[in-house]
Every structure is written in C-alpha cells, then in structure tokens.
Amino acid sequence: MRIDKWLWAARFFKTRTLASDELIKGRVHVNETTAKPSKEIKPGDVVQMRQGHQLKTVVVLGLSNMRGPASTAQGLYQETPESIELRAKNAREHALTKDPASSIQQGRPTKRQRRDLDGVQHDWDERWSASIDSR
C-alpha cells in the first residue's frame, strides 16, 4: 500500500494531497529513510512524522484503503513508548515556559506615551514654516 494513502486512511492528514505534500517535502520517514508518496509500506514498518510541533513515531500494524472512523484508524498503528514519552516531556516544558506576550501589561503605547518614552521635546512655537511672511 502507498504511504500517502495509509497516512490519509490512518487520519494523520485530512487529505491525501496534504500527506503527499509532507512526503515530497521530506518530513515523513519510513524505516529511517525519507519516503516519497509512492513508497510501499507493510505492517511492521516504522513511520516518523511531524504533526504541528510534535514529532511522532508509529509502527504500522495494519493497512486500509478506505478512510474510516477514528477508532478504526487508531487500530492501524501503535505509537512507540519513546514517542509518547517525548510528547509528554515537550508538553510539560511548554506548560512551564512563559508566553512573551504575557509580559506586556498595557499594550502598545499611545503617540503621547511614545514621545515621552523617546524623551523628545518639541518647541512648537519655533517650528519651521514655509510661508512667505516668515522672513
């Protein structure tokens, strides 16, 4: 069975086109080698892919040409214990890191606040004028 069809049937990607695009970009590996969309897979193969920011490693348990319900799709593969542990570790680290946007307390400064921050003092009475009367 083709890897792009299997990834679609196992519900890793919403469409077969998305699965093919990821394969063409080299983001999916089968048995530690970069796979093309036409790569044939069989039960026992190890597939490594990135979903969002998470790296998943799964072992192929079954093949299916049809996209079925999620419960059936989950029976087509088994995630490795190392992959589960790595995802849990990344989730803990993500929960402990502080979001940079949360340090902003008041939002963007207004024009007046920006001038005050820059320390620029304008003397508006002595500004330059292009009129003829100012000679």
Image (cartoon, helix red, strand yellow):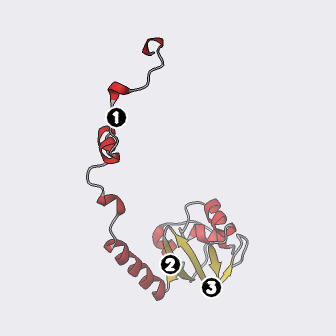
Q: Residue at x 45, y 72 (%)?
A: 71
The dot on residue 122 is 1
Q: In the displayed structure, does residue 88 sit left or right of residue 77?
A: left
Q: Are marks 1 and 2 in contact (CB under 8 Å)?
A: no
In the displayed structure, would residue 73 be above or below residue 108? below
Which mark, residue 75? 2
Residue 123 position within the rendered picture, expressed as x and y whole percent measured from the top left: 33, 31
At 48% from the left edge and 19% from the top edge, which residue is drawn?
Answer: 130
- Secondary structure beneath dot 1 equals loop
Which residue shows up at 61% across the image and 73% down it? 64
- What amino acid does circle 1 point to? His
Task: Residue 19: give x, y in percent of width and height.
Answer: 62, 65
Q: CA distance from mark 1 to mark 2?
A: 71 Å
User: Which residue is depicted at the point 39% across and 80% down?
Assistant: 88
Q: Does label 3 or label 2 sit earlier along the sequence?
A: 3
Residue on which the image places disc 3: 45
Q: Amino acid at mark 2?
A: Gly
Q: CA distance from mark 3 to mark 2?
A: 15 Å
| Discs 3/2, front | 3
x then y, percent, for residue 29: 64, 78
Residue extending furthest front? 135
